[in-house]
């Protein structure tokens, strides 16, 4: 039998109807804070990778976009999306961010073309774009040092050429001009947003001059190289925090802390204190509750298994999956999707003896859940996917356990076997209380834990 599999892509939630993990209340909290915040302001949405930060930013974007058509709105909010990771190789991340503002303006212009004169905005864009390129892309510094020898030095060469530079007055004057460009950048960005705001007020009837706000949503900044991430954070703080602007940065704080240590070495710089100087307030992505986890897993069945008859047959399989996730407190949405895909592969490979009669649509033959304990298979899939070293050690351990003791798994003997406590190496396991609670069916002819582990190995290693 083929399940006609449809694997789940790692795509964010973009509208509230698809919010199976209960982010709605959290998004409302952030939305309310943004609406009543005095600008400029920088928010952080913090959470580990895969916890749903992108989904939360996308839901915010959808909320603000939908509210633009509400005549009773207290504030006209313009969401501007920027994915920093797409521009990882750029020396100046502000320049592509400015283009995100320009794209947003172009979309607004299309909707209100007869009422908008884009001249002032385009003039402001050219000014701020040129300023950012000169001030932040080393262009100004290279131009200044080229006056000295005909070669353009980089900022990183500053210490080695210090004496040469400061002996020449014309170089000093050029560097002073470069410094002035840095000071001008903040004013130029404020002018750009003011031109955008003026266009909105002229196009949207009945909108007061103080009722426009720009919310710049920056995603995946923590996936950039440490120097790039820190440079962008400092640029936002120093040059882009202007009236009418709110920044919302989705960040994995631990990754940023590591970047701080990478940049500043073993100095006394605290990653937490550093980030507190950039972010005025932080929201922490909430963990989905148990019932939302079950609903998320079970409702994904409609996507994974398009055939209604097959969905009915496999409903119990997905109920077991969802409840195992709940019991183990396994609540990272990205990881759940990956394990779901593994689970579907396991069903397709090892429940294949259940042939479907084309005429009667009935299933016959041996079923996986008649012999294997599905909650144990799900737990083993989680361990194999996210703790692969421990999974391989577990297989070795099970190979050395006598067959009459392979109906349940005891954690302490296993930890003695591998020589360390799991929680010492993986602190998150302290919250996943039920993950290593493994057992097989009690009757002696059913597959034991060793065989459970072997079939999970077959789908996680594709053997």
Image (cartoon, grey):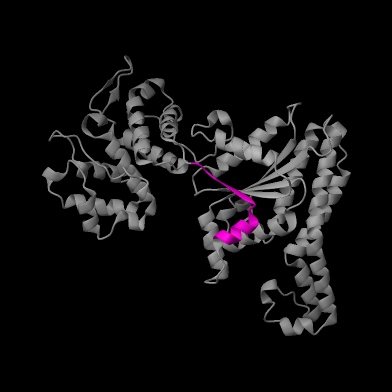
**Place of residue 178 in the rendered image (x, y in percent of width and height, measured from the top left):** 80, 68
**Place of residue 161 in the rendered image (x, y in percent of width and height, measured from the top left):** 71, 81
Identify the residue at horizontal 36%, vertical 23% (top origin).
310
For residue 356, side relative to residue 52 (left or right): left
Question: Can you say which quadrant of the picture contains the N terminus?
Answer: top left
Q: Considering only vertical position in the picture, is 34 above or below 221?
A: above
What segment carries the magenta color?
272-286
For residue 377, side relative to residue 239 (left or right): left
Q: Which residue lies most toward the top here?
A: 360
Q: Considering only vertical position in the picture, is 410 above or below 174?
A: above
Residue 108 magenta-drawn? no
Q: Can the viewer see residue 291 in this picture?
A: yes
Identify the residue at horizontal 29%, vertical 36% (top origin).
375
**Place of residue 398 in the rendered image (x, y in percent of width and height, measured from the top left):** 20, 49
Residue 283 magenta-drawn? yes
Q: Considering only vertical position in the picture, is 176 above or below 280?
A: below
Identify the residue at horizontal 65%, vertical 33% (top origin).
63
Nearer-the-camera pick, 329 or 309: 329
For residue 359, what is the image quadrant? Answer: top left
For residue 339, side relative to residue 123 (left or right): left
Q: Considering only vertical position in the picture, is 340 above or below 402?
A: above
**Place of residue 23 in the rendered image (x, y in percent of width and height, measured from the top left):** 53, 36
Nearer-the-camera pick, 179 or 312: 179
Q: Can the viewer see residue 90 in this picture?
A: no
- Give the total number of marks visible in the rendering: 0
């Amino acid at each position: 039998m083929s399940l006609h599999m449809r694997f789940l892509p790692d795509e964010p939630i973009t509208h509230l109807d698809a919010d199976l993990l209960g982010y709605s209340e959290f998004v409302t909290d952030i939305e309310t804070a943004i609406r009543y915040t005095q600008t400029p302001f920088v928010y952080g949405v913090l959470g580990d990778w895969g916890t749903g930060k992108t989904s939360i930013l996308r839901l915010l974007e959808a909320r603000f976009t939908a509210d633009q058509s509400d005549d009773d709105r207290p504030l006209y909010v313009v969401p501007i999306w920027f994915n920093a990771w797409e521009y990882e190789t750029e020396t100046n991340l502000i320049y592509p961010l400015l283009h995100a503002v320009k794209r947003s303006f172009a979309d607004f212009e299309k909707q209100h073309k007869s009422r908008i004169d884009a001249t002032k905005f385009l003039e402001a864009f050219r000014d701020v774009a040129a300023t950012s390129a000169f001030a932040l892309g080393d262009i100004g510094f290279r131009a200044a040092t080229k006056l000295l020898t005909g070669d353009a030095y980089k900022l990183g060469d500053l210490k080695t050429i210090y004496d040469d530079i400061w002996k020449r007055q014309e170089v000093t004057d050029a560097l002073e001009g470069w410094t002035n460009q840095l000071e001008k950048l903040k004013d130029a960005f404020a002018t750009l947003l003011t031109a955008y705001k003026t266009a909105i007020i002229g196009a949207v009837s009945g909108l007061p001059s103080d009722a426009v706000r720009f919310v710049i949503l920056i995603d995946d900044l923590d996936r950039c190289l440490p120097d790039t991430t820190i440079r962008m954070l400092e640029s936002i703080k120093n040059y882009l925090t202007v009236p009418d602007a709110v920044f919302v940065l989705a960040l994995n704080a631990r990754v940023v802390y590591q970047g701080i240590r990478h940049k500043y070495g073993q100095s006394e710089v605290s990653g937490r204190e550093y980030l507190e100087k950039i972010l005025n307030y932080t929201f922490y992505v909430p963990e989905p509750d148990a019932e939302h986890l079950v609903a998320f897993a079970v409702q994904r069945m409609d996507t994974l298994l398009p055939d209604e008859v097959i969905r009915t047959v496999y409903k119990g399989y997905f109920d077991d999956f969802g409840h195992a996730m709940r019991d183990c407190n396994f609540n990272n949405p990205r990881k759940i999707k990956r394990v779901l895909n593994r689970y579907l592969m396991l069903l397709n490979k090892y429940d294949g003896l259940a042939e479907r009669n084309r005429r009667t649509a009935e299933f016959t033959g041996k079923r996986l859940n008649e012999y294997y304990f599905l909650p144990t298979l799900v737990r083993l899939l989680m361990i194999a996917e996210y703790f692969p070293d421990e999974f391989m050690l577990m297989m070795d351990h099970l190979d050395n356990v006598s067959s009459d003791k392979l109906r349940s798994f005891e954690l302490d003997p296993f930890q003695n076997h591998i020589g360390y406590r799991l929680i010492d190496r993986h602190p998150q396991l302290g919250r996943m209380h039920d993950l290593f609670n493994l057992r097989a069916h009690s009757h002696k002819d059913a597959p034991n834990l060793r065989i459970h582990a072997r079939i999970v190995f077959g789908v996680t290693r594709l053997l």
